[in-house]
Amino acid sequence: MNQNQIPQRVASVHLIAVCGTGMGALAAALKEMGLAVTGSDAGVYPPMSTFLEKRGIAVSDGFSEKNLAHGPDLVVVGNAVKRDNPEAVCMLEMGLPYCSMPQAINRFMAKNRRTVVVTGTHGKTTTASMVAWLLQSAGCDPAFMIGGILNNFEANFRVGNGGYMVIEGDEYDTAFFDKGPKFLHYRPDIAIWTGAEFDHADIFRDLDHVRTAFDAFFAQIPGDSTLMAHGEDPGAETLLAGRSCRVETYGTRSSDFWRLEPEIRQPGWNRFSVFRGSHLFGRFRMKAVGAHNRLNALSAVAAAADLGLAPEAIARGLETFAGIRRRQEVRGVKNGVTVIDDFAHHPTAVRETISAIRSFYPENRLIAVFEPRTNTSMRKVFQAVYPTVFDDADIVCVRKPPLLHKVPQDQRFSSGHLVADLRARGMDAHYFTDTGDIVSFAARAAADGDVILVMSNGGFDNIHERLLEAL
């Protein structure tokens, strides 16, 4: 048997780099399925350390060949693991069977289930979460593996007992032994594609390179499956041409098979109508705000309908969808000031998030706080674009990237340059090298009725709680 192959019978599993969000969820799912699970990582700390401890999963702090001395039936290798990792070297020397995270998801969770795979540069987590909740609220008891914590479940995974599996399909590389995108391992019954923009600058050269990954994914979708694709994406016409599977576009154009029309604003609700072909499919409302979330919901509605859910069941599900942690999440209100947390970091996500919050708080002053810390946002590839995406904010606070030393000097993004460009556009913008200074400034500047929107894909030095305390 090839080492990179999962044995027929597996009773014990070891996960290298178990403290990643996806790997930790997989470990917990495998434990729930009755397997003996161990793991290791460098720097084991809360919340993932406590998450795994509560589930009875033994985690070793640090990588060592000793962690494989018990000879597990299978080793799952996280994509952060390099070939020279002591456990990777030991695994190969011992001849232990191993696989990547998506291979494990396929074998242990998606097997014999109708699978929905959500892909695209933006909106994957929200869209996949919506599909999962629509299935659950309709009584379908789905399994899912998603990159964010669903508030309806208080989890980012579920083993489920039903016949459906929802997967957030990531275009990032798979493992040191497989540099292809993770989503190439999945064979969906329904695929959702939210569109493509340039991202993951450490992996992809440019937008065309990103599109080649989606092209490869589309090419392997089975002929009897359905691809729900955002038809308004600039590259959609070329990417969707000649596919063997059924293709249904969604969007706001008259030519889209699934089309939405926003409805009159109702306080507290995001309302819209959905048309399938030329016929009204249903009218829906949800708490998630913004035009981008209407599009996310539209694709989820289309997928749910393709799986056989009635419009009435879908409507009930959307009304009770409670969102995802760190996506427009209100962290607290103190002295009339609302502090909101969001994962936005790509320029498009920053613009759409600010626009969505502005639409929900049209009369309030909006203070946008931004920390660039992804491999892409810390590079200057979007230096000229970021100044154009903060227009709906009243005050902008930008932190110096905290991990800038990881980027070659000639490729580094400049937060100071961004602030200068924002000021040249007439905006009230401020540059900070320290999170504590942002907290002090925002606490002084904020007044009753203001909204502080914090955008970062990291913990941002616990800025949300520090802001609430300072307020």
Image: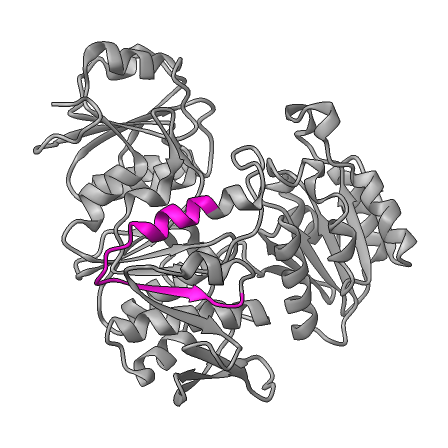
Quarter of the figure with residue 409 = top right
Q: Residue at x 86, y 48 (%)?
A: 421
187 lies above or below 362: above
Q: Horizontal placement of 356 versus 189: left or right? A: right
Looking at the rendering, the stretch of residues picked out in magenta corresponds to 212-232
Q: Is residue 93 left or right of residue 439?
A: left
Is 196 on the left or on the right of 50, as rendered? Answer: right
Residue drawn at the location 35% of the way across and 53% of the way down: 218
Rendered view: 317 above or below 35: below
Q: Residue at x 60, y 54 (%)?
A: 342
Q: Is residue 406 left or right of residue 286?
A: right
Where residue 202 sits: x, y (%)? 56, 32
Residues 225 and 144: in front is 225
Is 225 colored magenta in this rendering? Answer: yes
Q: Position of residue 278 (x, y in %)?
A: 41, 88
Q: Is residue 103 visible?
A: yes
**Percent x, y for residue 429?**
85, 52
In this rendering, the count of numbered labels is 0
Image quadrant containing the N terminus: top left
* Front residue of 165 and 452: 165
- Is residue 255 found inside the magenta-colored segment of the image? no
Residue furthest to the front: 242
| Image quadrant where residue 336 sits | bottom right
Q: Quadrant of the C terminus?
A: bottom right
Measured as percent of width and height from the top left, residue 405 is found at 68, 24
